[in-house]
Image (cartoon, grey):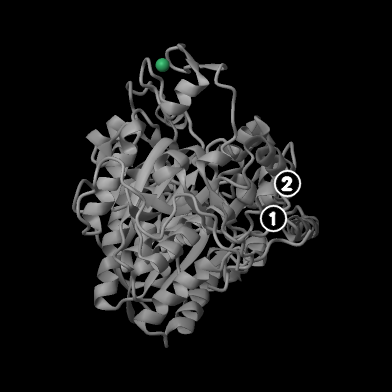
């Protein structure tokens, strides 16, 4: 399509390119305070081994755990106009962007990848809450459109992991326009009869919830994730009363009919394999290790063109 | 009685003096104040012109929210015949923040949908200040479906501070309702034209304004977040709403430069709240013009037109 201006050659990511952190360092569980070694945390996908609390996970780490052998190919996202409004609050928007890029090592708040899960080819997109609160601006919109187009091109399901405080205010009205834009992306999948699975992770709020995150064929969430349009504080100010325990959490939404399932992160991969294979009319996944099929190596570098 | 905005205070003083003079003259027939009163009128007129010549974004927000500004009901009464309101989402309730139904525009059967804020305390409460709950968006979805089936153009009038942030609204799926309404806007094979008549507040506005053509009144606003909300998050001080209004680029003029809207409907000097009739007539011709633009398109072309409009949006930023 005409809006694709910058094409970046896909690069292969593998488990070997992960940024290594020393295994002897520890992190405190934000819920129960248990000290968890980094290696232990990583192996358990940032889920506390003591209380089961789900802490944040970056899209890259999530993909490494999700895709077979940790191998995936990034799908290129067209670069939008930078700082379209010349936005400045107490800081300039480009400065906030630079800080976020430096802090996360990522270009923007969404990562799109193609790869296999349980030998099921899928496209996955994941939002990065650590990058300016995962906020949805032009780039995230472009990423979701690119993900949908790639899914349609390759006839694959799209699995989208949402995590965002909402729209990116620094892009003003253009961030708001990502609500209809991403809805068009969802329509592309619908028309191609391809499954669109949304995994709502903590937190998914505002314009993100009110667009692509609530338009999936299947809605899954991680335990205790906050999912809402208006945040609890805004509501408490409006109605001037305390909200009940667990309000707007995943289990509450499940109870109110907004989600299909609440699934632990450590069981998510199996869940997604099962659902995508069911919807794609594929035979059940074969459990356990398989030898590499003929003519395919596990972490082969792409041949240069 | 005119309700003056904060920045119109000097105007209120001059007009007040002129009014006082005339009241005095009515009591004392021999007093000749005509000249003096006229001079004050002249002064007021000049001041009004200068105040409205270059409204700051924050002042535009105040004008857009002026209680006397024509609301959805005023437009429906003036621009449509045979307005037949249709109620309810067939699921839970009828949301009075959203008006809608069948009507005729220039004799042509249409569906009209809009946010209504209300005009006095009682009606404002009835209409929940134009803040819709899920039922309002679901009613709109139902009406858009009907329009699609019977080939009726849809006209939406946007005027909302935003979707209602309430407990029940959240429980009943505010997010899902907004998402579905936006999706429905993109699906219907009939012309969909939208006018932002006051406030275009975030997702609550998008749900009705994902249209083939979008027009805004000259002093209306359309934004991802209210200036007050933005100020309290980014400046950590809600009082910085002037700065936030500036930074957000929420005016009709900025949205036009960004390619987000298609036309600006001029307001007579002093704003829509001083010139209801002019404003309503301006909206009438804008709707007629937008519908005429789309009249030759097939249902498929209308859907494609709408999609491409939004897909290509954002290709240009504002000049430095
Ligand atoms: Zn814990």
Q: Evaluate whether label 1 is on the same chain as label 2.
A: yes
**Residue farthest toward the bottom in the current orientation of the protein:** B296
Q: Give the residue at mark 1.
A: A82
Name above or below for residue B86 compared with residue B103: above
Q: Residue at x 49, y 65 (%)?
A: B195
How many numbered markers are drawn? Answer: 2
Local packing at callout 2 (Cα closer than 10 Å; few below 14, some 14-19, many 20+) is some
In space, the residues marked 1 and 2 are separated at their CA atoms by: 8 Å
Q: Where is residue A242 in the image (x, y as percent from the top left)?
A: 38, 21
**CB contact under 8 Å: marks 1 and 2:** yes
Looking at the picture, tell me which residue is in the foreground, A112 or B310: A112
Residue B122 seen anywhere in this rendered image of the structure: no
Mark 1 residue's CB less than 8 Å from ligand 1: no
Q: Residue at x 36, y 43 (%)?
A: A199
Looking at the picture, tell me which residue is in the foreground, A154 or A126: A154
Q: Which residue is drawn at 23% across and 40% down?
A: A257
Q: Which of the two discs, 1 and 2, labels the residue nearer the N terminus?
A: 1
Local packing at callout 1 (Cα closer than 10 Å; few below 14, some 14-19, many 20+) is some
Residue B303 seen anywhere in this rendered image of the structure: yes
Q: Where is residue B137 in the image (x, y as percent from the top left)?
A: 33, 53
Q: Give the residue at mark 2.
A: A94
Residue A258 falls in image quadrant: top left
Q: Position of residue B201 (x, y in %)?
A: 50, 50
Name above or below for residue A271 compared with residue B287: above
Q: Residue at x 26, y 61 (%)?
A: B142
Q: Position of residue B24 (x, y in %)?
A: 69, 47
Looking at the picture, tell me which residue is in the foreground, A233 or A126: A126
Name above or below for residue B36 compared with residue A243: below
Instruction: Say which quadrant the C terminus of chain A sits in.
Output: bottom right
């Amino acid at each position: 399509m005409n809006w694709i201006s910058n094409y970046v050659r896909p690069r292969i990511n593998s488990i070997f390119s992960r940024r290594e952190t020393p295994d002897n360092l520890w992190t405190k569980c934000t819920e129960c305070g248990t000290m968890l070694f980094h290696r232990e945390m990583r192996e358990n996908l940032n889920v506390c081994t003591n209380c089961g609390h789900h802490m944040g996970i970056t899209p890259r780490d999530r993909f490494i755990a999700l895709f077979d052998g940790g191998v995936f190919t990034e799908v290129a996202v067209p670069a939008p106009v930078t700082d379209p409004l010349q936005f400045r609050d107490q800081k300039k928007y480009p400065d906030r962007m630079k800080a976020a890029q430096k802090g996360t090592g990522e270009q923007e708040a969404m990562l799109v990848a193609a790869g296999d899960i349980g030998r099921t080819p899928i496209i996955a997109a994941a939002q990065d809450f650590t990058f300016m609160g995962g906020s949805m601006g032009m780039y995230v919109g472009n990423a979701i459109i690119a993900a949908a187009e790639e899914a349609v091109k390759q006839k694959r399901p799209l699995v989208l992991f949402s995590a965002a405080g909402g729209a990116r205010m620094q892009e003003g009205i253009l961030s708001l326009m990502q609500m209809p834009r991403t809805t068009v992306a969802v329509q592309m999948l619908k028309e191609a009869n391809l499954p669109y699975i949304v995994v709502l992770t903590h937190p998914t709020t505002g314009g993100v919830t009110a667009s692509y995150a609530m338009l999936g064929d299947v809605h899954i969430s991680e335990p205790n994730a906050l999912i809402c349009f208006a945040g609890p504080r805004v509501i408490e100010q409006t109605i001037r009363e305390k909200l009940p325990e667990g309000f707007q959490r995943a289990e509450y939404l499940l109870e109110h009919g907004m989600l299909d399932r609440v699934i632990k992160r450590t069981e998510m991969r199996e869940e997604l394999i099962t659902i995508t294979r069911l919807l794609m009319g594929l035979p059940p996944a074969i459990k356990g290790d398989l030898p590499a099929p003929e003519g395919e190596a596990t972490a082969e570098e792409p041949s240069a063109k | 009685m005119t309700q003056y905005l904060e920045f119109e205070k000097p105007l209120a003083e001059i007009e007040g003096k002129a009014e006082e003079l005339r009241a005095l003259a009515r009591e004392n027939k021999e007093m000749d104040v005509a000249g003096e009163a006229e001079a004050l009128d002249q002064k007021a007129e000049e001041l009004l012109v200068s105040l409205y010549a270059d409204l700051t974004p924050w002042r535009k927000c105040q004008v857009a929210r002026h209680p006397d500004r024509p609301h959805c009901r005023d437009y429906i009464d003036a621009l449509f015949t045979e307005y037949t309101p249709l109620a309810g989402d067939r699921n839970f309730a009828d949301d009075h923040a959203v008006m809608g139904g069948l009507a005729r525009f220039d004799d042509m059967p249409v569906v009209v949908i809009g946010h209504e804020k209300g005009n006095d305390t009682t009606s404002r409460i009835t209409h929940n200040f134009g803040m819709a709950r899920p039922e309002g968006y679901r009613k709109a979805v139902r009406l858009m479906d009907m329009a699609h089936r019977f080939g009726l153009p849809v006209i939406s009038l946007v005027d909302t501070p935003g979707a209602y942030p309430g407990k029940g609204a959240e429980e009943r799926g505010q997010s899902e309702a907004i998402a579905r309404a936006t999706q429905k806007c993109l699906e219907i094979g009939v012309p969909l034209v939208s006018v932002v008549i006051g406030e275009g507040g975030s997702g609550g506005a998008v749900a009705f304004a994902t249209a083939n053509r979008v027009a805004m009144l000259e002093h209306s606003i359309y934004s991802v977040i209210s200036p007050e909300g933005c100020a309290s998050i980014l400046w950590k001080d809600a009082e910085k709403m002037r700065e936030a209004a500036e930074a957000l680029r929420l005016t009709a003029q900025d949205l036009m430069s960004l390619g987000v809207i298609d036309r600006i409907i001029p307001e007579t000097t002093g704003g829509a709240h001083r010139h209801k009739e002019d404003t309503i007539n301006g909206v009438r011709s804008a709707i007629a013009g937008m519908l005429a633009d789309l009249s030759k398109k097939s249902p498929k072309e209308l859907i494609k037109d709408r999609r491409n409009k939004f897909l290509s949006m954002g290709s240009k930023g504002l000049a430095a």
